Amino acid sequence: MKKTFISIILIAVMAAVSSFAVDATYVSGPGSIPWTATSAVSAGDVIVLNTNLFGVVKTDIASNEVGTVYVEGVYEMAKDGSVVTAIGDRIYWVTSGNPFGTTTGTGAASSSSSAGTNSCIGCAIETRAISNTTVRVMLQGWKQ
């Protein structure tokens, strides 16, 4: 009984000491970050968080709520209808882009940097013709 009590006290002391010596605390899994939406967003939306960070929304997030944004992985995205993409091409997100066959100005992936005004989001992992509506993109998560 006495040994058990001493062991419990020792474990409690060690836990208390270790909680003060933490250099980092786990926040989220590989390839994702927590993010507070400034307006409502839907699952699958591509968002540019700032000029250096972008990702894909995991699930719907209401305005002023925290949700998860993927910043790594491979995603099939709406492709700009005016470009061909080749495997390995840098892919840019054009927030006012024109996805092939859908609503004009709603955003699209493109292999055109448009004189540096679009955010590079990753690279194409397949070759796609002008007539293809989507392209698979390996996100890099941050602008390099």
Image (cartoon, rainbow, N blue to C red):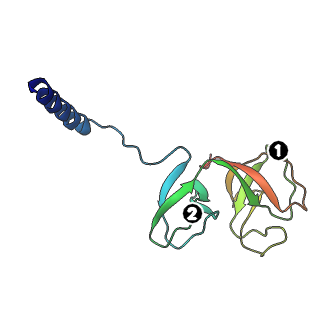
Q: Earlier in the sequence, mark 2 or mark 1?
A: 2
- Name the disc covering residue 136, or none: none
Image point (80%, 59%), residue name: 134
Q: Is residue 115 visible?
A: no
Residue at image mark 2: 59
Q: Does residue 83 lie above or below 105 as drawn?
A: above
- Counting from the top left corner in percent of width and height, residue 98 is at 78, 70
Image point (61%, 65%), residue name: 43
Q: Residue flagged by tag 2: what amino acid is it?
A: Thr
- Farthest-out residue, left: 2
Q: The N terminus is located in which quarter?
A: top left
Q: Does residue 89 lie above or below 45 as drawn?
A: above
- Counting from the top left corner in percent of width and height, residue 67 is at 49, 61
Distance from disc 2 to disc 1, alpha carbons, whole Å, reads 28 Å
- Farthest-out residue, front: 1
- Farthest-out residue, top: 3
Q: The C terminus is located in which quarter?
A: top right
Q: Does residue 77 lie above or below 99 as drawn?
A: above
Dot 2 alpha-carbon crowd within 10 angstroms: few under 14, some 14 to 19, many 20 or more: some
Q: Quadrant of residue 117?
A: bottom right
Image point (20%, 31%), residue name: 11
Residue at image mark 1: 87
- Counting from the top left corner in percent of width and height, residue 35 is at 48, 60
Image point (13%, 32%), residue name: 9
- Counting from the top left corner in percent of width and height, residue 42 is at 60, 69
Of labels 2 and 1, the one closer to you: 2
Horizontally, residue 79 falls left or right of residue 6, namely right
Q: Residue flagged by tag 1: what amino acid is it?
A: Ile
Which residue is more in the foreground, 139 or 53? 139
Q: Secondary structure at mark 1?
A: loop
Q: Secondary structure at mark 2?
A: loop
